Every structure is written in structure tokens, then in C-alpha cells.
Amino acid sequence: MLATVLVGASDLGWRRVLAEIAAQLTGGTSPLSEREAAIVWQLRVPRVLLAGLVGAALASSGAAFQGVFRNPLADPYLLGAAAGAGMAATIVVVLAPATTDWIVGPLPIAAFAGALLGVGLSWLLGRSSGGTGTATLLLAGVAVAAFLTAVQTFVQQLNTETIRQVYTWMLGGLNVSGWREVLLALPYVATAAVVLCLCARLLDVLTLGDAEASSLGVRPGRVRLLLLAAASLATAAAVAVSGLIGFVGIVVPHLVRLLAGASYRVIVPLSLIGGAVFLIVADHIASTVLPGELPLGVVTAFAGAPFFLLILRTTRTRMP
Amino acid sequence: MPHPRPTLATLLLLGVLALAGCADREEPAGTEGDDSGAFPVEVQAEGAPAVTLETRPERIVSLSPVATETLYAVGAGAQVVAVDAVSNHPEQAPTTELSGLNPDPEAILAHQPDLVVVNADLENKLADALAPTGTKTLVLPAAATLDAAYRQFELLGTATGHRAEGEDLARRTREDLAKIVADTPEPEQPLTYYHEVDETFYSVTSTTFIGQVYDRFGLTNIADGDDPNAAGGYPQLSAETILRADPDLIFLADTVCCGQNAETVAQRPGWDTLTAVREGRVVELNDDIASRWSPRVVDFARAVSEAVTTAVAGTSE
């Protein structure tokens, strides 16, 4: 984290930035100009923190989804969370483009509501169709995601002049971010993280099967609902402040599983940390590898897709 | 639905009606159809297929805002029967729900055009769909340079039977721009600028059509970096890069689309430290004027000139 604060898109000199941090901590004289200090404290530091928050949210909720559905392909974007957020954001951009504020305006709130709507619809449809297995819920999620994406595409086609805005948001990124986004996401991600960590033991129980879990005094339905709500909350908060950033929720929990074993009591908290590190590094690459910005979602896909295939190859025999 | 090729009598009748109907339109004086007999004519924009027009088009559908503005400027407004949803200038342009991005041949043919003007036509799909009805498709890709824009003015004049007006428009635009530049004071030190396309910091480099306008005033583009050709001339900058560069002038081309203005810019993290913000040199452009290679490029140049003049006056005080 410190390394990414020291080096950024503009060359301030890492020693000077280090001296600036030391000066702020000790009350000494700052070596940076007012503008350079603004770059460090108003751009770099909140951006790194936000990347950490978003990464932690996506990875921990990915681990939770995989545990709840006992499916290694489950991730935060399954069950229509991303599709719902994308649809809601598109509608806001189209209906009120002049009022669209990427920080505190209607867009993040709409994305948040859309993500929850997507997951809620998937869960209700999965339940009402009579199935109790994870496959039913996953199929419901696929159907809901397809429907919400269709609505989004329809709205986009009717309003082609705003496609650029929607498209940029869907690529995902933290370029336009500051302390306000950090403060916006922090309470939701923190709440979800606490719930997921406290309930990680229950995820281990769920992996035994519903009958075994019931025999141990756990009510699988209620536990799933609680975990789904917490994971959706974290996902929605992440999507609201950063747009759509894929692969974090699949790759990080799998990597943790490979390194630290199959217990969710370990996977969930380590995914929180691993997700944060993964996205901080990915965002640093996005902001420094080219003269301009590279969409963060592109970087995570570049890194995540091949890695995901590698994980699939090495773990397929052990997957449920 | 196939549309029969218009007969000579129909064309004559339409021509008379068009001339009669344009009495209250803004047309350049004494220029109506002065060279309409110069058909057939072959026209071809750079990077687009050639089109042969046997007769003067009398029912034009424009699916390009730039083409719409230019058609009216060369005196072909009376021949325009429909324009796409984004063509919002001039006021009298017959705006419809037609899409230039995703053109629908059937919806276009409902206006019974004899010429359709579009920005792009991948694999000639639109042209192939319209051809059986006798409708010609003229593709006018984005002009990469000012000279390419002038050539499009002339081309549209030629294609619509207003060759002289097209050439005159190109000449006048070139001269107007040159005069505006000449009348603008030169700063002692080169001024730097940042042109904002949207609020996620997409910008333009000096290799683009827009960048070339700034270039005429001797302004230095902070988006050029080491490679002005990066990202096709439309890179996304980071806030950090912009703050570090501390441009002398900030031009906002996202005032309409995205509600940006000097106040919202000042509220962005760290932007209150920028010289341009503190000195009041944030210029609120009209998104459309600052993105179209139409005759209104003169208005864009005028806005840049005013900003440079103000900046020079401020620095010399």
C-alpha cells in the first residue's frame, strides 16, 4: 500500500513523498508544494484505500457466494448483482445526465439498489420455482442477469447519446475517486466484512450438506439468506463506487484456497486481505503502465482470466 | 419496401416545391441551385467509397450532425427532409428519431430519400440496403484535420448542387479562422491547456481535429505526453497527471452531457490548487460545438481566442 502511494502517474519522487508522509506524522516541514501534497493526500491515498476496499469487498463476497452455493463458479457478479447495478446506472445516466455525479449523486445509489434488486429477484425466483438446490438458484441468477442486461441494452439503444458514459462506467475504474467514495463505501463494506468473517464457520458447516448442517443445529436457509445479504451488500457498495470490475471475486478466493486450505474460516478473512492487495496492485498498473489510464476492469481481466484457467486446471479434480 | 426511381417529371416537381418551400429558410443569397446542372457527379470523402449522383438530390436524409450543419450552411437546407436524433443544429433541421449510430434502412426509407448522408457504413451494409430503391449513400467519416473538414464542406456542396457555396464556405471558414488566430494576442510564454471530453478525464491530443484548433493558437496540450498518437488521440488521463501538469487553461467540453462547469471542477479533489481554477480560466464550451468539424468550428475557435486573450491580459497585468 505504501509503495503504491510513493509511486504514481506523476513523478513526485518517492523520497519526497516519503518525507511528506513523515512530515505529516511528526509535524515537520513538508517538502512538497500545495499541489503535490494534494496529489498525495487527496488523490493517491484515497484511491489506494478505495482499491483496497473494493478488492476486499469483491473477494470476500466471492468466497461467500462460492460457499453458499457450494459452487466454485459463483462470484459476486452471479445472481444478477452486476447486471442490476448496470441497468440501474444506465437508467440514471439516461434520465438525468446533467445531474449524474459520480461521487454522491444518484448513480452510486441507483447502482447499489440495482445490485440488491438483481440478487433479490434471483433469490425469489429460485425459491418460487420450487427448487431447493444451488443449481436452481444459479439458473435463476443467469435468467435474471440476462433479463436485466436486456433492459439495459434496450434503454441504451433508445438513448445512444449517453452510451459513452455508460460504457466508461461499465469498464470499471477508480480514476475519479477521492475521500468521499471511501467514506461512501466504507460502512457497507465494513459491515459486510464483519458479518462474513463471523459467519465463516457456518460456511464450513454448509459445505457438509443441508441435512448434516441441520443435524448440527444450523438452519441452512436462514444462514444462506444472511450470507447472501452481506455479500450482496459488499458487492453493491463496490460496484457503486468503482463500476464493474470482474474476476476479483473468483480468482482471489481460489488462490487463497490453494495456499491456505479449504476452510472458510481461513478463506474469508484471507480473501479480504488478498482482494485488497490484488486490486491495489491492479489499479496501480492501470494508472501507471500507460501514459493515460487503462480501465481497471481490463487489467483485472488480463490478470484474472489466465490465472482463473490455471486454477481450474490445477483444482478441477478436487472441485465439488 | 422498395421505392420506385423518381421520374424526371417528379424530380422537377420536387425541385420546384423545394425551391418554393425554402423561401423562409436561411439560405446564402443568390445561391440557390446555381450549378444544379453539373450532374452527374462523383463524390468521395477520404476513407469512404465513391458515390455517383446522376441528378441533384432533392430529398436528403442526414444521419450526421456535422453533415446536417454543413448542408444548411451550403444552402442545401431546403433539400433536407429528415435528420437524425442527435442533429440539433440549425433549429429548422427536421429532427427525427433516426439513429446515425445504428441506422435502420426501413425507417430511413420512410422519408423517401434520394440521398442519405452518414458518418460510417460498415461493410457498405446501409448502402447495399438502400441501393435497390435508387437511394444513394454518402459516407462522411470524421475529419482528422481542418483541411479534411474544409474538403467535406466542398464535397457536400458538390453533392447537393451547391458547388460554389461549398467552396465559398470552405474559403470563408479558413479565412475566418485565420483572422481569429491573427487577432488573438500571443502569450510571452506558451500556455498549456487541458481539454475535457467527459468527467472521467477523457481528453484529446494535438493530433486530433480538436487539438489542431488549439494548435493554431500556439497552445500546448498536456494530454500529448510522450506520444500524441496514443489511444488514437483520445487518451484517458488520470487526475494526478492533470494536477501535476497544472494547465494554464481548462476547456470543458462536457458541460451539456455531464453537467460540468467551473464550480464542479473546483470541487474535485485537489483541483482547487490548479492555477486555471484559481485564476478563473476554466472555459465552459458547448459540447457540440467543441466536437463537430462543421462550419461552427469558427465559434469554437472564437471561444478559444477569448480564453487566450483573457489569459494573456491576466498574465501581463
Image (cartoon, grey):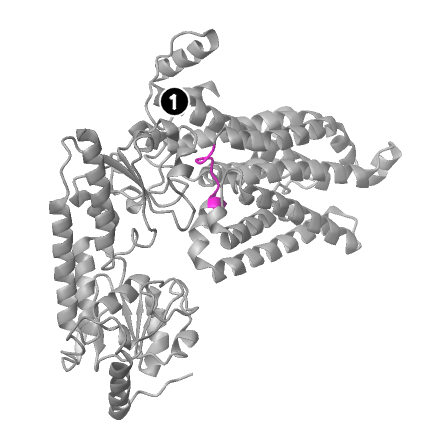
- Could you say which is closer to the camera, residue A18 or residue A215? A18
**Label 1: chain letter:** A
Magenta stretch, overall SS: loop
Tell me where residue B249 sits by quadrant. top left
Would residue B221 be found to the left or right of residue A112 on screen? left
Magenta highlight range: A169-177
Residue positioned most to the front: B317
Q: Name the residue under label 1.
A: A7
The residue depicted at 17 percent of the width and 42 percent of the height is B217
The residue depicted at 63 percent of the width and 29 percent of the height is A187
Q: Is residue B158 above or below residue A184?
A: below
Q: Position of residue A260 (x, y in %)?
A: 63, 24
- Could you say which is closer to the camera, residue A7 or residue B195? B195
Q: Is residue A113 visible?
A: yes
Q: In this view, does A34 lie above or below B232?
A: above
The residue depicted at 65 percent of the width and 55 percent of the height is A143
Query: Residue B159 in magenta?
Result: no
Q: Which amino acid does label 1 sit on?
A: Val
Q: Position of residue A248 (x, y in %)?
A: 55, 36
Q: Where is residue B197 in the image (x, y as percent from the top left)?
A: 35, 45
Quarter of the picture containing the C terminus of chain A is: top right
Would residue A11 be found to the left or right of residue B189 on screen? right
